[in-house]
Amino acid sequence: MKFIIGNGKNLVDFTYVENVVHGHILAAEQLQKDSPLCGKAFHITNDEPVPFWEFLTRILAGLHYDPPKYRIPYWLAYYLSLLFSLVLLLLSPLVAIRSTFTPMRVALAGTFHYYSCERAKRDMGYKPVVCLDEAIARTIKSYPHLHRTR
């Protein structure tokens, strides 16, 4: 990844799988017949929103890759990805190319997307069991095949 899409300040709240499991267990314990919680939606997050590009830089550093150096405006990246997708669609009868540069991926990398887990904390007693720092360390450790050899 060479480019930071947008201004680099878009917040995201990644959720470690163990926290998701913990949230499901709490829900199973709380959501019994006639419970006032039935029918309500709950967001389970790490409750640590961080700038997406800061998060990605930490992952890349842990895998021994360089962080993105250049910035590209969000609108430009998005429209380039639309144009590229259109070109691939037109070429699809001739050649099959799967691109990772798609409007959806640009949107995921360049926009804010995080949710409040306040309702889960208040109504179910949810609290993340694995903090973001530990989650990143565990994730990096669990993917040794992705580490760049220097």
Image (cartoon, helix red, strand yellow):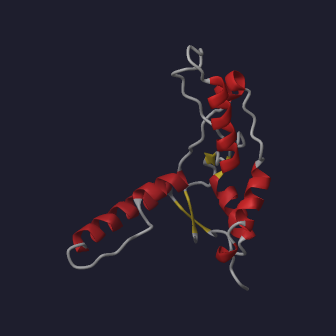
Residue shown at 68%/80% (left/top)?
148
Residue placed furthest toward the front:
33
> Relative to residue 87, is residue 62 drawn left or right?
right
Rendered view: 110 above or below 102: above
Question: Where residue 50 appears, x then y in whole percent?
Answer: 69, 48
Residue shown at 55%/20% (left/top)?
38
- 142 and 100: which is toward the camera: 142
Question: Where residue 13 appears, x then y in whole percent?
Answer: 64, 45
Question: Where residue 92 appears, x then y in whole percent?
Answer: 24, 72
The quarter of the picture where the C terminus appears is bottom right
Question: Where residue 1 appears, x then y in whole percent?
Answer: 57, 70
> Relative to residue 41, is residue 97 drawn left or right?
left
- 119 and 104: which is toward the camera: 119
The reply to whether residue 16 is in sight is no
Residue shown at 66%/76% (left/top)?
145
The reply to whether residue 7 is in sight is yes
Residue shown at 66%/35% (left/top)?
25
- 74 and 107: which is toward the camera: 107
Residue placed furthest toward the bottom:
150
